[in-house]
Image (tube, helix red, strand yellow):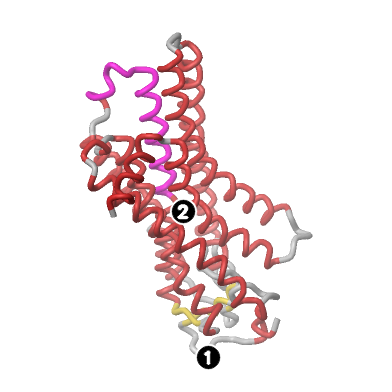
Amino acid sequence: MAAFNLTPSDPSTFLLTGIPGLEAAHVWISIPFSMFYIIGLLGNVTFLSVVGKEQTLHKPMYLLLCMLALKDIATPTFIMPKALCIFWFNLKDITVAGCLTQMFFLHMASVMHSSTLVTMAFNCYIATCNPLRYGTILSNAQIAKLGLVGFIKAVLFILPLPLLLSQQPFCANHIIPPTQCEHIAVVKMVCGNITVSRIYGLVLMFVINGLDLTLIALSYILIIRAILRISSKKAHQKSLNTCTVHICVMLTYYTPGLFSNLTHRFGQGITPHIHIILADLCLLLPPMLNPIIYGVKNKELRDKVSKYTCRR
């Protein structure tokens, strides 16, 4: 707990404490965190390599999974180098500019991830409910355009967060308990009026998460209804397998985040280091689990990965 008695000597820096209360175990905690990161990195790089080399996988569904894989590589990479510097070398200082930059990329990646999941739900809906027009409605070019729209939306929606905070004075105590610069943690460091930042953050959360989840839920209600009407057992099973992959990927993204938010807001009796560990796992576990889900649930991809690795 000594970290809370320290204040950065430079007013232009913050102090990331890592996991307060577990400073003595930082090195041991870094071991599973590093393993999760490396496994996720290898899995997603392998997936991208196989899809890039195999022409038969150049389809809209795999292009969407490639977008998720790129995001799953980027998100933990935004936090792990600094987290490992804290765990291994006790290097806790981060500049205000660096903190706001990390915050921007973390939240931007989250918005892009959510947008990609909506596109995946729409892709599954078209493939199940209107398969004859699938090729004309969703081509690789259309998916690329939707990805670009999602990227522009993420930048435009998230950019005001660091811009608003950069105009505010920060208090003398620049200590941030988590291992990364989340918006909710940085806002607490502001000594000025944060009403606009708080309102914008809440509106952003409800507009993006609420709208995306509503569209995803509506798509899968229509998809499940269409699947139940399919008479062919083979077509029924194929549609169900495709949608199961998408649903599992969505659960790995939304479930840990929802659980972490609920414990943060309503679990007042839970110690702070539990909240921080949960927040870190929410950023590390989905990138590790997603390639496993692709491989287990998708026979075509599993065969191509086996062919590629055996050839190696």
Q: Is residue 121 magenta?
A: yes
Residue at the image point whose x is 34% and y is 56% from the top: 45
- Provide the major secondary structure of the magenta segment: helix
Could you tell which of marks 2 and 1 lies nearer the N-terminus?
A: 1
The part of the image, by quadrant, that contains residue 179 is bottom right
Task: Name the secondary structure under disc 2.
Answer: helix
Q: Which residue is mark 2?
A: 287
Q: Name the quadrant of the C terminus.
A: bottom left
In the rendered image, residue 185, in percent from the top left (x then y), is placed at 57, 66
What span is in magenta?
Answer: 111-136
Query: From the viewer's perspective, is residue 129 above or below residue 245?
Result: above
Amino acid tagged 2: Pro
Residue under numbered circle 1: 9
Q: Is residue 269 left or right of residue 263?
A: right
Residue 23 is left or right of residue 190, and the answer is right
Count of number-bearing discs = 2
How crowded is the residue under tag 2: few (<14 C-alpha within 10 Å), some, or many (20+)? many
Task: Identify the residue at horizontal 56%, vertical 79% (top origin).
Answer: 174
Q: Residue furthest front?
A: 310
Residue 77 vs residue 119, the one in the foreground:
77
